[in-house]
Image (spheres, rainbow, N blue to C red):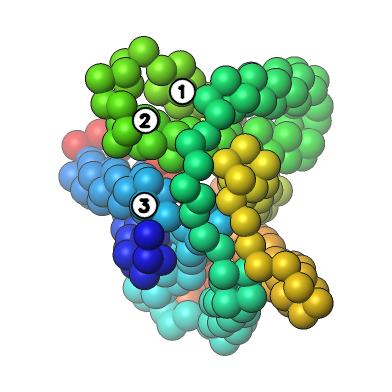
Amino acid sequence: MDTWLPALLAIGAAALIAVGTVLRQRASMRSGAAAMWWTGAMVAICGFTLQATALGLGSILLVQPLVVLAVLFALPMEAYFDHRRSTRREWMWGGVLVGSVGLFLCAASPHDVARRPDHLLIVVTIGGLIALLVGLVFAAERADRHNRALYYGLVAGALFGISALLVKTVVDVSLNDPLALAMRPELYLFVLVAGGGVIAQQRSFVSGELQTSFPAMTVMEPAVSMVLGVSLLGESVEVGWWQTPVMIIALVGMVYAVVILARQSALRNEPWASDAGSADAVDARGSRNTVDSATQSPPPA
């Protein structure tokens, strides 16, 4: 399978997810903006559909780093709603993110594999991971607000990363043995994992420390999905005397840029942040980015 089609689908998914996220987040801050919220929800669903299609056609190691670019695509939309220009700091870290993703993909040359996944191994491994995450949930409920936000952010990101792997396996079954899809445990495990991710995400937001939970969530999703793609699906990258250090540098740059951008976004969505779009307030508190409010209820019409 050529990589250009899943890559284009992943970039399109990132753009749609960014648009949908910004619209939902903004609508949740206003009264009488139900139409905007539902518009954002529909756009985000289209984005997730593109992401699932990309995962079905290409490698997780190719798709997930590109979907992270949603953080970048949200910058101009956030600036538009705030009636301001994106700051140099935002574009600088956005450039670092794009450069790191491109460097990783060029050095890694990720490619899908022809072998069929071991579905029993996938189910057993994911079951074990879910058990560990349940323990982290119990720890979160007993922790202070800061650590609760961190733990739930990690749980949500991990569950969304697991969902990406399950989407790929479900697509594989649907393409190779569609009549058996309803009997495959991966389909129902995906529903369980995705639902748990949404609940954990909302719990992390309720904790009130978005500057802690949002970066953890944003980094965990691609990290978990990429590790599972290599270990369970046999996906591979080019490994050589120069590729390995370059990939490590690129991954570090990618993670750091995402954390910086996500942290700025979360800080501006704290309760004390101005939602009137004042340029002075925005400058005083940092540049504004995207916090996913997909789990929040739509505002009353």
User: In the rendered structure, which disc, 1 or 2, sits on the residue that comes first in sequence?
Assistant: 2
| Above or below for 245 versus 227 | below
Outermost residue to the bottom: 88
Residue 253, x across and y down, in percent: 70, 72
Secondary structure type for disc 3: helix
In-front residue for pair 256/167: 167
> Which residue corresponds to the image point at 56% horizontal and 57% vertical from the top-left?
61
Secondary structure type for disc 2: helix
Give the residue at mark 3: 57
Q: Is residue 47 visible?
A: no
Give the residue at mark 1: 186
Q: Is residue 142 visible?
A: yes
The answer to whether the residues at label 3 and label 1 have Cβ atoms under 8 Å apart is: no
Q: Quadrant of residue 87?
A: bottom right
Secondary structure type for disc 1: helix
> Which residue corresponds to the image point at 52% horizontal and 34% vertical from the top-left?
117
Give the residue at mark 2: 173
